[in-house]
Amino acid sequence: VNASSDGSIKWVHVVAQASCWDKDGRVLEYFGAVQDVTQRRLAEAAIDKARSELAHVTRIMTLGTLTASIAHEVNQPLSGIITNASTCLRMLAADPPNIKGAQETVRRTIRDGNRAADVIARLRALFSKKAAATETVDLNETTREVLKLMFSDLLRNGVDLRLELDHDHALLVTGDRVQLQQVILNLVRNASDAMRDVNDRPKHLLVKVEREEGGGARLIVKDAGVGLDPQTVGRLFDAFYTTKSDGMGIGLSVSRSIIESHGGKLWAEANEGPGTTFSFSLPRLAASETDDRTGEAALTPDLRGERDVMRNS
Amino acid sequence: MIESRPLLSVVDDDESLRESLPDLLQEFGFAVETFASAEEFLASGRIGETRCLILDIAMPGMSGPDLQRELVQRHQKVPIIFITAHADQSVIPRLIEQGAVACLRKPFSDTALREALDAALAPP
């Protein structure tokens, strides 16, 4: 590192080799080269910075989506609690007081309070990430958790969601649960956005988790949206490439790098009909081969019949 | 006696709201009918009697704003109070512009609801 004439720092790379020795083996002369690597250093620093900014922006964006869903999920029961409590006060203040009616409103207040607590418990499960980020993740369960949080959002966008989980197998993978959830959230949100302006057909969205032959677990997100322009397919996963007017074009590139860091792959295909299918595949944990039955039993009991629960009803 | 109370219709897909809100509205002195969807309300034959419609914005199938447009097309001039659990306020000005009396964000207080109802039922 040298200070150059204008005061800025120069990075140099020095390579040298002894080329001349005296009779005792002491070096008399070195032969070497000094290379100015300032440009390379600056470029590397810029890439590092861009990379961490990308990660940050994605986190903020997914947080924004999550926050909206959480607000909705919590506001519903809160609304019930406040209305019931207001009614209760009025019933008790009446002459004569309406005790029976008041009791009923209190019962409903407690139930709605529990509903709000359930939402928080679900969130806690979603974010209970240990510092060391590798854990065993059940793709069925993780997908279900993400969709539960996104459900009201999808509903609002008029999306007809069909969720197909693999009820016969626990699909266990190793990885960072929150990162994988971010990928799922990204793909589902992209699919929903792609159908935003679709008015001439149902906004079908299929989210499917399945076991792959040869030791993989796959997640498929199939929309009936605007579809892919064949010319742009190759650029889909480039950072800052986007077809959305309000998008930043980082979701898919970050999603792909997350999946690849988990030893998997993420790809896109145009549908036969309208829309696009995004899929990722992750190596399945060997234990889920032998442990299918216990793995399944360990899942929450309401997983079966999930399709009915999650459909617009 | 009951018949003379003004009828309010509540349209919301959230069941706990359909349970809780009618009791409060009855305490206010209104008769109340609840509907789980906009379609159900349209098919009910109670549109003409409804003095004020309390309407959720986001519902599966026909949304609250969809129903508002449908009623305008049918020349039904029932006052509408929108309610929503979403924090997104950007849709509210448009709904008011199209004739809604008020838009209450859940959770709302009984006084806010009372004020909106007073505004909706005030003689023109």
Image (spheres, grey):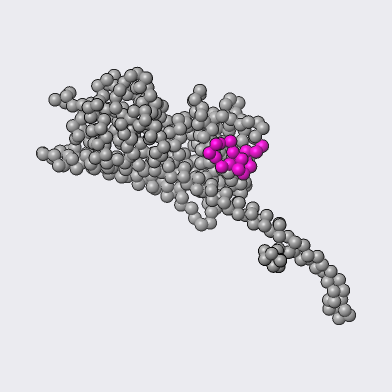
Q: Is residue A97 left or right of residue B116?
A: left
Does the magenta portion include A244?
yes
Image-based side of A115 in relation to A288, left or right? left
Quadrant where the C terminus of chain A is found in the figure: top left
Residue at 45%, 32% in the rendered image: A157
Residue B38 percent location from the top left of the image: 35, 25
Asked where in the image residue A271 lies, by quadrant, the reply is: top right
The magenta-colored residue range is A234-249
**Residue A110 visible in the current orientation:** yes
* Residue B31 in picture, x, y percent from top left: 21, 28
Q: Residue at x 60, y 51 (%)?
A: A50
Q: Is residue A42 above or below residue A291?
A: below
Q: x%, y% of residue A51?
A: 60, 51
- In the image as oriented, which residue stretches furthest toward the right? A23
Q: Residue at x 85, y 76 (%)?
A: A28
Residue A176 in view of the camera: no
Determine if the magenta segment contains residue A256.
no
